[in-house]
Image: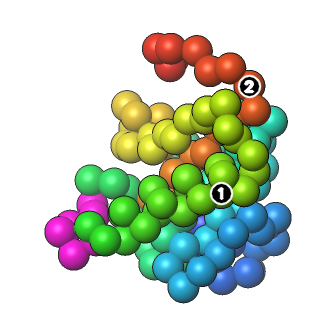
Amino acid sequence: MNCLFCQIVEGKIPSTPVFQDDQSYAFADISPKAPVHVLIVPREHIGRLDQADESKRALLGHLLWTAAEIARKQGLANGYRIVVNTGEEGGQTVDHLHLHLLGGREMTWPPG
Ligand code: 5GP
Ligand code: ZN
């Protein structure tokens, strides 16, 4: 499978690591949309959120916890935003499930 984020997880494409453990890998977004913009991905390939079946419930929780842990470590005490773009209308451009952690500036609502 020719998946960009699988290749990043495997180290075949370079990235700037932020956090990693046995289930997840987090790295700096190549085109940051905020002073802090980190992508958190599962090490295993899951295309998108709606392809995560019941067996992935704990993993999904782990990814969310990972995002919160990174936010704590990055000192985002004033708040931050977690985004999971899903599918074409959701704005997903890379087909490997990922959480965006955005922080370091005030966010606006609603998103575009
Ligand atoms: P999506 O639009 O699918 O929610 O988010 C994909 C994200 O991946 C975008 O924010 C984009 O900047 C980032 N991205 C795309 N290609 C690369 C890459 O090669 N390296 C890194 N670090 N980020 C990438
Ligand atoms: Zn993948």
Residue contact at pointers 1 and 2, CB within 8 angstroms: no
Residue 6 at what x, y percent from top left? 57, 74
x, y percent for residue 70? 65, 57
Residue drawn 50% across the image and 79% down it? 23
The color scheme shown is rainbow
- Residue 70: image tag: 1
Residue 105, which numbered label? Answer: 2
Residue shown at the point (20%, 67%) measured from the top left: 53
Q: Is residue 14 visible?
A: yes
Q: Is residue 101 above or below residue 47?
A: above
Type of amino acid at the residue the image marks with label 2 = Arg
Stretch of the chain drawn in magenta: 51-56
Within the magenta stretch, is there residue 10? Answer: no
Question: What kind of secondary structure does the magenta stretch mostly adopt?
Answer: helix
- The percent position of residue 43, horizontal first and vertical second, equals 52, 77
Amino acid, disc 1:
Ile
Q: Is residue 55 magenta?
A: yes
Frontmost residue, 90 versus 111: 111
Instruction: Tell whether 18 sits left or right of 24.
Output: right
Residue 88: x and y in percent read 39, 38
Residue 80 sits in quarter? top right
Q: Secondary structure at mark 2?
A: loop
| Residue name at image x 49 percent, y 40 percent | 83
Q: Is residue 47 left or right of residue 4?
A: left
Q: Which residue is found at the position 39% from the left and 43% from the top? A: 86
